[in-house]
Image (tube, grey):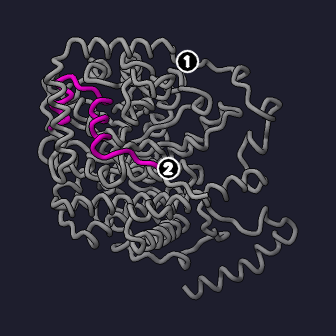
């Protein structure tokens, strides 16, 4: 290694210097989006991992190289397209279209009222029904959403957090009506409330009762719906809010530690629920950093679960994750080139070993994607899977000097963040103190300043602009088909709810809601069985969230001026 170091120094002083004297490099310091400095070239002297302890073999601890020994040689990742808009009927048609095009799992987007626990006929829902996702207020809506979709064969992923348990109760009820035993249901509910307080904002209740809902769902599904992933611990929205790759890993895993600790404190054995934990990451633009990020996160989580929590089941050590390409990188300017960004991001996710993938559509910076746009996005995954050749061997970038160096450095920096959060009292305390929010805001500000000063190039935005890219984007001039949600669906949803309330047994519904409120005011009463009974009785999402609001109150973010 000493000889190699001397040889590299000689190369820098002779070969490199002859070139840089005539043609200086584009900038003095090269670094990743996370600010990790990058050398001009790496050699074995720069990276000396302990192979068995730091890398190992695919499917074995510490899982740096993948959670399965054969990875995509055995089967491809689940190809999902996050979709949902307008009514349950419209979204059901989109799901069937995607399944016919080769999608292998559903990913449900809910509208804003549903996400924050309001029915479509609530005054606070006015103007938002069906706009950014599908409107689901009752079991009637869920029946229509999943009509003709075999729940014993298709896995369902739902991006829902504060009312996650209620939506899962509806899926369980529909499954029973299809003759599917809850023990056979497969899918994921996001159910990650902590990141809502720092990045996304669709919370309802204060943090501590919200954590109770999370652990209650862990307990229920461990016995009743054992194939269901009870949480998708999400770094995606943390990254979308402006975090770096290092912060995404650190804050996501810190939240995961908080959920595991809360469940252990509630009396659950770690090996009864940890195998069903899953994660959700962003695939951003810095290709090499993103590949290394996924590998570092997998290794760090395995070590946390085995060393910190003493998990004995190897499945408890696995970091299984879904990936979505970065929405925040899509541009309204020259939207057709978003296809290229998405392709690179999706390839990074695959080379990083994802288990599930959503590719954003080219027009999402402008409006809801059309069928043509989602088909192109799905075909992107299929080309990577079938034509690129990267799936033919496991972890094909392993051993790359720069990839291994970045993997080590991301893990080291993420662990430093986690230790800081632990010193503050854990993720929940760090959020309550504003530490995580402040770190994300600082990172977002630095990135935006780099774009505005031109230090960071965004093609079509601050460089390589066309004549139409200067100033505000005129969406009417964009030559793409546009998907428009009919505002009349709001009245349709109100009418459907009125009909439900008219035909249901009012006393039974009131009694079911009263039982939920009583249990919510008690410290340890299970809630999930009561949610299941309530939705089957005809209680609506808004009514159930309403009684929980009465018991627990609503969270109000603390704003520092």
Q: Is residue 231 above or below residue 310?
A: above
Q: Quadrant of residue 133?
A: top left
Q: Is residue 499 above or below residue 80?
A: above
Instruction: Name the outermost residue toward the bottom.
Output: 2
Q: Position of residue 25 (x, y in %)?
A: 79, 65
- Residue at image mark 1: 484
Position of 258 with respect to 419 (left or right) is left
Task: Please report contact status of discs 2 and 1: CB closer than 8 Å, yes or no.
Answer: no
Residue at the (54%, 31%) spot, across then down: 361
Foreground pick, 422 / 557: 557
Q: Position of residue 436 (x, y in %)?
A: 49, 61
Q: Which mark is residue 199?
A: 2
Q: Is residue 470 above or below residue 269?
A: above
Position of 156 with respect to 17 (left or right) is left
Q: Which residues are magenta?
A: 530-557
Q: Quadrant of the N terminus?
A: bottom right
Q: Position of residue 438 (x, y in %)?
A: 56, 61
Q: Quadrant of residue 503?
A: top left
Q: Main secondary structure of the magenta part?
A: helix
Position of 431 with respect to 451 (left or right) is left
Q: Secondary structure at mark 2?
A: helix
Q: Is residue 422 above or below residue 164?
A: below
Check disc 2: other Cα within 10 Å, few if <14, some if 14-19, many if 20+: many
Residue at the (33%, 52%) spot, across then down: 320
Q: Position of residue 108 (x, y in %)?
A: 38, 31
Q: Quadrant of the C terminus?
A: bottom right
């Amino acid at each position: 290694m000493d000889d190699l170091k001397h040889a590299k120094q000689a190369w820098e002083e002779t070969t490199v210097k002859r070139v840089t004297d005539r043609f200086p490099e584009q900038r003095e310091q090269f670094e990743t989006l996370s600010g990790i400095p990058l050398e001009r070239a790496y050699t074995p002297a720069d990276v000396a991992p302990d192979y068995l302890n730091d890398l190992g073999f695919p499917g074995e601890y510490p899982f740096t190289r993948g959670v399965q020994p054969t990875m995509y040689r055995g089967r491809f990742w689940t190809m999902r397209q996050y979709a949902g808009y307008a009514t349950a009927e419209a979204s059901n048609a989109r799901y069937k279209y995607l399944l016919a095009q080769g999608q292998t799992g559903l990913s449900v987007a809910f509208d804003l009222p549903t996400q924050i626990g309001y029915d479509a006929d609530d005054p606070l829902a006015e103007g938002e029904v069906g706009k950014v996702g599908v409107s689901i207020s009752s079991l009637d809506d869920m029946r229509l959403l999943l009509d003709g979709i075999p729940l014993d064969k298709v896995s369902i992923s739902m991006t829902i957090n504060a009312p996650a348990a209620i939506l899962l109760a509806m899926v369980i009820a529909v499954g029973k009506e299809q003759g599917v035993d809850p023990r056979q249901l497969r899918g994921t509910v996001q159910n990650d409330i902590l990141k809502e307080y720092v990045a996304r904002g669709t919370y309802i209740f204060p943090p501590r009762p919200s954590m109770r809902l999370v652990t209650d769902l862990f307990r229920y599904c461990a016995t009743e719906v054992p194939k269901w992933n009870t949480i998708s611990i999400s770094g995606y929205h943390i990254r979308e809010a402006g975090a770096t790759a290092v912060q995404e890993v650190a804050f996501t895993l810190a939240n995961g530690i908080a959920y595991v600790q809360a469940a252990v404190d509630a009396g659950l054995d770690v090996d009864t629920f940890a195998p069903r934990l899953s994660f959700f990451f962003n695939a951003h633009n810095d290709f090499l950093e993103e590949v290394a990020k996924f590998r570092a996160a997998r290794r760090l989580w395995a070590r946390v679960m085995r060393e910190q929590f003493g998990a004995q089941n190897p499945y408890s050590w696995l970091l299984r994750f879904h990936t979505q390409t970065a929405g925040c990188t899509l541009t309204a300017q020259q939207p057709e080139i978003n296809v290229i960004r998405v392709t690179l991001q999706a390839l990074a996710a695959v080379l990083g070993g994802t288990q599930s993938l959503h590719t954003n559509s080219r027009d999402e910076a402008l409006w809801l994607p059309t069928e043509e746009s989602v088909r192109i996005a799905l075909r992107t995954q299929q080309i990577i899977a079938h034509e690129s050749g990267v799936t033919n061997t496991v972890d094909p970038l392993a051993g790359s000097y720069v990839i291994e160096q970045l993997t080590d450095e991301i893990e080291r920096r993420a662990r430093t963040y986690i230790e800081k959060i632990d010193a503050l009292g854990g993720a929940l305390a760090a959020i309550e103190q504003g530490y995580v929010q402040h770190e994300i805001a600082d990172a977002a500000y630095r990135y935006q300043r780099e774009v505005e000063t031109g230090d960071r190039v965004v093609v079509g935005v601050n460089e390589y602009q066309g004549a139409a890219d200067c100033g505000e984007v005129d969406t009417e001039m964009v030559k793409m088909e546009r998907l428009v949600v009919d505002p009349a669906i709001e009245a349709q949803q109100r009418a459907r709810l009125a009909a439900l309330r008219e035909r249901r047994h009012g006393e039974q519904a009131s009694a079911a809601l009263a039982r939920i409120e009583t249990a919510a005011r008690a410290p340890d009463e299970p809630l999930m069985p009561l949610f299941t009974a309530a939705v089957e009785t005809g209680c609506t999402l808004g009514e159930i969230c309403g009684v929980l609001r009465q018991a627990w109150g609503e969270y109000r973010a603390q704003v520092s001026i």
